[in-house]
Image (cartoon, rainbow, N blue to C red):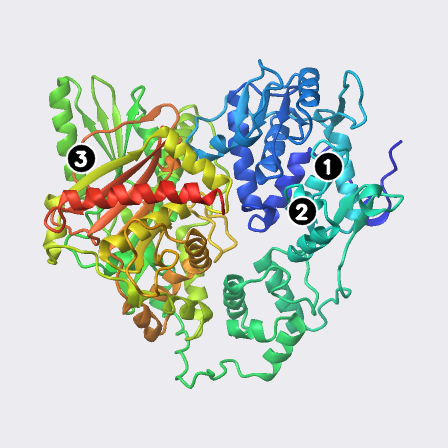
Amino acid sequence: MSAPAPAGPWGDLDPTVPVHALVARQAATTPRAVAVADATGRWTYAELLAAADALATRLARAGVGPGHHVGVHLPRRRALVAALLATLQLGAAYVPLDPTHPAERLALLTRDAAPTVLVHVAETRVDPAPNTPVLDVDEALTTAPGSDPPAPGAPAAVTPDTPAYVLYPSGSTGRPKGVLLPHRGISGILQYARAAFGFRPGDAVLALASPSFGFAALEVLLPLVSGGTLHLLDRRPLQDPAELGAEAADRGITFLMGTPSMFDTLTATAERDRGPARTAPRTGTEQALAALWCETLGLDGVGVHEDFLTIGGDSLSALRTAARCRRAGLHLDPRTLYEAPTVARLAARLRTEPADPPPTTGAPPAPARPEEPAALAGTAPLLPTQHRFFGRAFGEIGHDNEPLLFAVDHCLDRTALARCLTRLADRHPALTSRFVELAGERRVRPGDSAVAVPLEWHDHTGLDEAAADRAFTDAARRLHHRLDLREGPVCRAAYFRRDGGDRLLLLLHHLVCDGVTLHTLAEELSTLYRQTAAGLDDTLGPPPPSALDYARELQDLADALPRETPQLDAWLRLPWDRVRPFPTTAEDPGSLARPHLRTLRTSLDPRTARTVRTVARSSPYTTEDLLIAAVARGVAEFSGASAACLDVVRHGRLSPLTASDLSRTVGRLSTITPFVLDTAADGTPPGAPSAAGALPDLRALSAQIGRLHAIEHVWGVLRHLHRDPAVAGRLAGLPKPEVYLDFRGAGLHDLPVGPPFSLVTGDTGVTRTPTHPRPYPLEIRIDVADQRLDLHWKFSLRRNAEDDIRRLARRCTDLLVRLAESATGA
């Protein structure tokens, strides 16, 4: 018999809300909070939902839908949680199959449950039912979001009585019989327990039960509907009470759930260690600070005696908090958060200290942020990548473009297409950008969305295919020279009528687009045209945060920074002095112009590439980290140095410098950050060149890469946005990276295009001025395509012999494979 809903704050239960919807609601509130952690890493709520969506797409394509069962045969890893949520959002029920159980019992359960698909990973692969299709989670999650076609059909309609979970009691003998548990029951229990146990964001649960045990669903899902963190470990540490206690202490566990036998009590237990009771803010300053902390850290409330660093704060959130305080009129040095890390102590400091305290270093104070002149009203500062672009010396800056070429399955309506382009510009102000000089600085002024993306119409009907191709190429080449950074436009479109099939060319300047931008525009244009042509209102929803607003947020952050910060010190302490120039035979910039460039392509075969990815997923090291480590070591050997410096481009949009969701923001938001790494092998004397043939210390390299990940988002802010020229000057004076590394993955190539468009290739003209010199002697682009890892090595024949670059490529590939193999013992 179920207990009635408790009164008071617990009486607000709504068991009609599906289980996965409860998690999605929490993810929308705290997308950047850590949702689940295991022995190999952690996922935020946003990353967990992205993984669940990716698996749901694969499961749907395998035929899973409402009323179906999905066997989940996974170890205690993050993918287990993603698989459960993916199953639930399709309206199916999951069947937990514990990999530690005997194969005979698993076979009985599988035969009884008759799952549509069995989800597993390579190390748990068994064959409990020979006719059951299987899905390898590692392989499914290796594919970047957007690289698979969307699953057929609309999202499943889940009712409160839709089965969510098939439970097989652990004492079953003979032929097992599963019990179907509906969403209504699990959702109600989760909401009841959240209130009864007092769960809140920041709580942490260490999962102890087998996935197939009765209360495992509560143990796994309760922290996720509450904003907490679920910690998953393998079974070994959970057998020893001393190890269990150590793990709980190390991970800041606030809840342990279990059976009486687990805790030697007569009832199931939920224990917590809360510390002193929370004290509410008492003064106006405390209330303002508490509200700002909640905004930055994604919390519902903060007590005045809670420590900033123990409730989720770190060095980057300290910077964001300081920027928000400055906008609220509270002049806060980020260092003060470390010296007075509670609301009460910080409020006392703000009452007794001057607004701009003198620095403790003896250096003159950083200049105060000037008030913006009236001439800057309505404009935005540049993003760091845009500053970087304008800081490079080359000729025709307006000719640096990115084309998107679509085949069209029928002749489009010109008015409808023009209306769609205007709608895109209206949703994404970056497409209207004008780069102007105002009050002594370069700024971005948004333009009129109605004329932001001019549409040309070319009629090449009646021409044979060869003549139509020539006419198209000529028009495309002219289009490249008709983008104007100052007056606009920065984006143009051209439609081509052809007897062999129409085409649409979209041309964008690199200052306003990156790989994620192309994804967003391709998908939204397809959707908009279908709906506009049918006379329907668009269903794109509210526009995402704009790149211009993000630029303002970053500049506010930079303005709040003092001259000396821990992040600046961390950048300056890297082993820059041990980096050596990339060996070349010519130094003149002209040797890096387009006519002298060549691209060498090397590949890892599908089997080796899959081994690298699988090993990376089962070890503490990501594929990208392994690639960075291998290339850094190879370059160091090639240069005769003990350290290497790579400019690493990052396409992700989960910046810790903002709470905004930038995943669909249009603009040049990718980052380029120098990764300076000590690549010495075990036993190599400090400072000695890396010995060819030796294997570097992967643990040490991974630790360095992790430390760089922690500060990489601040590089552009310090280097390009800080108001104190001494700060930017110190970073500008460091050695310039000469090797560029761009790991793209499959998702940046497979754009989510739908009817009436399909992506095609063709001669769209020269995207950059032919005499435009490249900034690096060596550029390495790494693509994931058809389960391969393809590496493209772009270099100048005026600077390096092809045989030398080929030897470097072979060495880096060998290092990648050997590092991946060594990771299995890490």
Q: Is 802 or 758 nearer to us in this picture?
A: 802
Tell me if 358 is positioned left or right of 449 in this view. right
Q: Dot 1, how many residues are within 10 Å of its Cα: few (below 14), some (14-19), or many (20+)?
A: some
| Secondary structure of residue under mark 1 | helix
Tell me if 450 is positioned left or right of 123 in this view. left
Name the residue that disc number 1 marks.
Answer: 216
Residue 623 visible in the picture: no
Cα separation between marks 1 and 2: 18 Å
Q: Dot 3, how many residues are within 10 Å of its Cα: few (below 14), some (14-19), or many (20+)?
A: many
Give the percent coordinates (x, y) of residue 670. 36, 50
Name the residue that disc number 3 marks.
Answer: 476
Give the percent coordinates (x, y) of residue 75. 61, 35
With respect to residue 354, does 648 lie above or below?
A: above
Cα separation between marks 2 and 3: 63 Å
User: Mark 2 or mark 3, which has the lower sequence index?
Assistant: 2
Name the residue that disc number 2 marks.
Answer: 237
Total residue callouts: 3
The amino acid pointed to by label 3 is Ala
